Image (cartoon, rainbow, N blue to C red):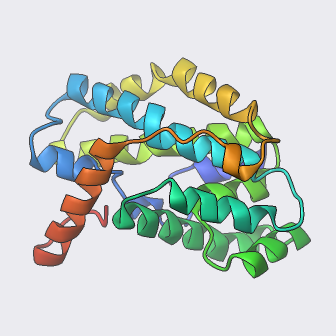
Amino acid sequence: MDLVALMLADSRFPGGGHAHSGGLEEAVARRLVTDEASLASFLVGRLRTAGALGAVFAAAATRDAPGRHAELDAELDARTPSPAQRAAGRAQGRGVARAARRAWPSPALTGLLRATPRPHHPIIVGVLVGDPFEAAQTVAYHAVTGPATGAIRLLGLDPFGVNAVLARLAGEIDAVAGAAADHAGAAPVDLPAPASPGLDLLAEAHDRHHREEVRLFVT
């Protein structure tokens, strides 16, 4: 795996991902996730919906063409009905952009940020990584590691058990990444749009509660 992809997937990368639980905090508050088994179900659902959506756009963003990245960003916006989810995607994209300007300055990054100054997270990951499968794999992995880390902090789950849950998702993450890479050359308007209405509802509920009371995560 490319070093850039590895660094972007690392929880220590200063991209701001640590502030987001991917809907897990609200799921925990509603007792939808209480243990390793329910966490595993949550992660599989998130991977197959929001994770797959992000992965396909990350793969597509590795293809450079005039106006493509701005169009991809707009299409991802259209496929994300939750305002809270859209804000989270752009916040994480902005965090990655801030770090990437120092770590990997390039004409491709400059062109992306000129076309869309606040890109969604999958779009900038695709531009930085460059390889469709690895970009998709990075975003798919990121979609489940944030909630998994959140489960350790919110529920006090055994870190070894949580990481075993993640390890068992390896094949599914690769399958999502492979399917996403198959669509890398498609026109933005034709990209798949797996929906996650449950996650959208959790995101909106968490956003309301976050403004009313102290929460550990932004999302």
| Of 181 and 151, the residue lying toward us | 181
Task: Specify whether residue 162 is in view.
Answer: yes
Indicate the quadrant where residue 82 lies: bottom left
Indicate left or right for 163 with 192 as reference: left
Query: Residue visible at 62% across and 54% down?
Result: 122
Is 62 situated above or below 109? Answer: above
Q: How many marks?
A: 0
Query: Residue visible at 77% across and 81% down?
Result: 114
Place of residue 14 in the rendered image (x, y in percent of width and height, measured from the top left): 55, 66
Task: Specify whether residue 163 is in view.
Answer: no
Query: Residue visible at 77% across and 51% down?
Result: 129
Place of residue 197 in the rendered image (x, y in percent of width and height, measured from the top left): 32, 45
Indicate left or right for 167 with 139 as reference: left
| Of 121 and 82, the residue lying toward us | 82
Outermost residue toward the front in this view: 189
The quarter in which the C terminus is drawn is bottom left
Is 194 situated above or below 75? Answer: above
Is 15 situated above or below 114? Answer: above
The quarter in which the N terminus is drawn is top right
Indicate the quadrant where residue 178 lies: top right
Indicate left or right for 165 with 111 as reference: left
Query: Residue visible at 26% across and 47% down?
Result: 24
Place of residue 165 in the rendered image (x, y in percent of width and height, measured from the top left): 37, 24
Place of residue 52 in the rendered image (x, y in percent of width and height, measured from the top left): 54, 37
Indicate the quadrant where residue 71 lies: bottom right
